[in-house]
Image (cartoon, helix red, strand yellow):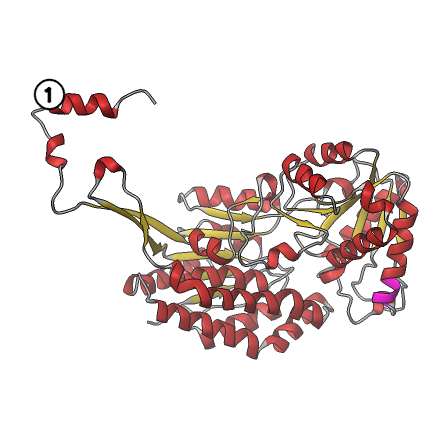
Amino acid sequence: MNAPSTHIGQELSAAELKATLESLRQAYRINPYPSWNQRREWLQKLSDMIYENKMAFAEAISADFGYRSATDTLLAEVFPSLEGIRHAIKHGKSWMKVRKQGASIWFKPGSTALMPQPLGVIGVIVPWNYPLFLSAGPLVAALAAGNRTFIKMSEYTPRFSALLDQKLTQYLGRDVVQVVNGGPEVAAEFSRLPFDHILFTGSTPVGKMVMKAAAENLVPVTLELGGKSPAIVTAETAANDARLKNAVGRVISGKSINAGQTCIAPDYLMVPEGCEDRVLAHAKDIVSKRFPDGILSKDFTGIVSDRHATRLQRLLDEAAETGARVVNLMKTGDNPGRKVPLTFVLNAKDDTGLMQEEIFGPVLPIVTYKRLDDALAYVNARPRPLALYLFDDNSKTQELVMQQTIAGGVCINETLFHIAQENLPFGGVGDSGMGHYHGKFGFDTMTKLKPIFKQARFNSAEMLAPPYGKTIQTLLGILTRKV
């Protein structure tokens, strides 16, 4: 089948987008239920593509960012992508099996089952911050579930997008997956296409627009958004200096990888009143050891665009002008490019942009509290976050915080690692998103679990047919009895 060519760097018209979708839908109709051998082959080819081109992908992403640490790409994009494929190859055959269910006693000897069936064509809208992982992750779920996929990449990553398009065509072919680049206009038209499911990763405001556009065709959506994810250090942890230093170190890890341009990065740190100076002292010590060359360290990533770097500086300037204490944790140098240093901010006012917007950069406000209940009330008074990080060793305190807060996902005494667990669903709640994927959860999201009732050859169904007599009345008396 000759699919329309994909143009990276050139925005497709609405008609061209529809034609591309139709080409994928035709491929799906030819083989609407791919065998496991076919799906496994797709997944293996995707794995080969990522492994064999990992350094080329890292170089392309770095070029798009102005500078991005290759280690960040390998650690946060290549590794979890390959791990997700390994998991799907290992378990996918069992996921696609028909799942026997129990039939009600009143309908036996009939039987019931759930048949996992591919939905058709999945639309994936990928952000710029992790362009490999956030295209590969949804693609793994789509391929394991037997679907075709149409991926819309971000205009901020044109070099990577062009390379990804080339390699996906080479390894999988355009009857399996296609890629398109483009700005907001292309994204809007893409969202209006009659997909069988859309998975969007990005900001909450744009997620609302995608959901509204998808609703025109009643297309179900999975929205992986963001928000202000808190990290909470309890008084018990703060009282133990070694545990406090560990907590600060893990928060810095979550905030420094990809220069904080991560949807689940800690967005503010809550600590008990009186320990701020100790937190800062630990932070300065940790950062000086991890990034001895400061902002010029080869392990520290730049900001993706001038616009995003300017926005971060605006947030910092506003905070400083309204009385916040801005503490730069890194050595600066000449010609840093679009690099913004790791920065802690104390006493930022709640009505400033720093405390209202998702920061999406290496800037971390510190918020103090008197009692743990006050910290939980602070978190619960705000939109539900995509992630919550708790630093505490007491099982009762852990249970309390888990019960009293709602978040898309949680790490205890760690940051970010929950996203790499293929046996856990990843997704938001409320303003931070809806729906889940990763592992079997992604397979189920991109599958129609078709309910099937199979009548036995010999059954009593005819007893329920008219004319109704005393037997059916007696049976109805039993069936409609009080619960």
Q: Is residue 181 visible?
A: no
Which quadrant, please, contains the N terminus?
bottom left
- Quadrant in the rendering for residue 149: bottom left
Taking the magenta stretch, the answer to whether it contains residue 150 is: no
Q: Is residue 232 above or below residue 177?
A: above
Check disc 1 and report the residue beneath it: 470
Label 1 environment density (alpha carbons within 10 Å; few <14, some 14–19, many ≥20): few
Q: Is residue 91 above or below residue 463?
A: below
Residue at the image position 62 percent from the left and 54 percent from the top: 418
Q: Position of residue 196 (x, y in %)?
A: 39, 52
Q: Which residues are magenta?
A: 287-291
Which quadrant, please, contains the C terminus?
top left
| For residue 34, side relative to residue 465 (left or right) | right
**197 or 483, nearer to the observer:** 483
**174 or 290, nearer to the observer:** 290
**64 or 186, nearer to the observer:** 64
Q: Residue furthest bottom?
A: 52
**370 or 353, nearer to the observer:** 370
